[in-house]
Image: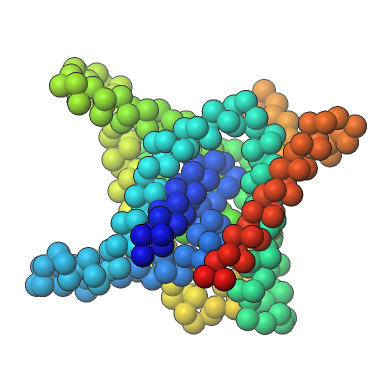
Amino acid sequence: MLKTNIFLFLKGVAMGTVNKIPGVSGGTVAFVTGIYEDLLNSIKKINFTSFKILFSQGFKAFYREINGKFLTIVFSGVIVSFFSVSLILDRLIEKYELYVFGLFFGMIVGSFYVIYYQLEKINTKSLIGVTIGIISGLSISLADSYNVGTSDLIIFFSGVIAISGMILPGLSGSYLLLLMGNYTLIMVDSVNALYFTLIESLSFDFTFINDPERLYLLKVLILFTLGSIFGLVFLSNVLSLLLKNYKTITISIIVGFIAGSLIGVWPWKNEDINGDLSLFIPDFSISQTWITIFNILIGILFVVLLERLANRH
């Protein structure tokens, strides 16, 4: 049991880590590691009925109803990654961006081996679903950036959009925040504000309450978190319903979406002064290219072996 819980926690860590990276989806990790449907069904149970149980039968019954142990372990991993592993990953991307994205590209390619067995059958319906997914994924990956502002309502809906990457495989919430022009405000500035606030509070230093900028960033984080919780429950209910009634077409679209989003993690790309990205074919005469290709192969191998290990147990 302890071993199972540790692996579940590590899956949460992996979800939280990659969800912070523009172009990579935490939902893809959940899908590949086999906890996707359990995650959706558990979150789906957080509804009027479960809250009725909370007030009539107490917290223990509520906790049991929503599969609380599973959710607690997974989201503990997500939270821990956000303030630890993801910070390490930020540093690695700063120094070795090409190699890190090579590894993630390989992991997503390898995930198709796993996802293939999720499709009950290959037919016209599933091929249409894959095509729709690919077109949708490419449309988002190739979209131009636009700034939608930073009003309270926009920040709230940014939370709904960002959490979509945790629920929808292939859809990067962080990448959507980049397109909206709010990535730095939410994922960097507000998170740093929370970190410094916690450190200062533990030292009984509450001078931040006189800092308007700090208070604004904390408000941004609160609105974003509320939007994320709303989006998490809403999207989980919708997707759980789709998987229950239209499993083949839903998984087909997810497969296509992941394929279409691959362009977002293509390792070889340039960024101009306006922040626009252009992809290119690497130079095979330099060692850097072959190291990246090696990382891609490692990523593919890691996911395939992980899936086989999971099936064996």
Residue 231 visible in image: no
Does residue 152 appear left or right of residue 29 in this picture? left
* Residue 237, quarter of the rendered image: bottom left
Q: Name the foreground residue: 29 vs 186.
A: 29
Give the residue at x 60% y 78%: 248
Q: Identify the residue at image location x=84%, y=39%.
A: 281
* Quarter of the figure that contains the N terminus: bottom left
Place of residue 37 in the rendered image (x, y in percent of width and height, measured from the top left): 46, 70
Q: Is residue 227 left or right of residue 285?
A: left
Residue 34: where, in percent of width, then height?
Answer: 51, 66
Task: Tell me: residue 305, above or below residue 49.
Answer: above
- Total tally of numbered discs in the picture: 0
Return the residue found at the far right: 285
Question: Viewed as shown, does residue 59 lie left or right of 265?
Answer: left
Q: Residue at x 69, y 34 (%)?
A: 98
- Residue 12, percent across and down? 43, 52
With respect to residue 221, does 8 lie above or below? below
Residue 34 seen by the camera: yes
Q: Residue at x 65, y 32 (%)?
A: 97
Is 59 left or right of 154, judged from the image as shown? Answer: left
The front one of 208 and 139 is 208
Q: Position of residue 40 (x, y in %)?
A: 41, 67
Colour convention of the picture: rainbow
Examine the rendered structure and indicate whether residue 218 appears above or below residue 165. above
- The answer to whether 240 is drawn above or below residue 22 in the figure is below
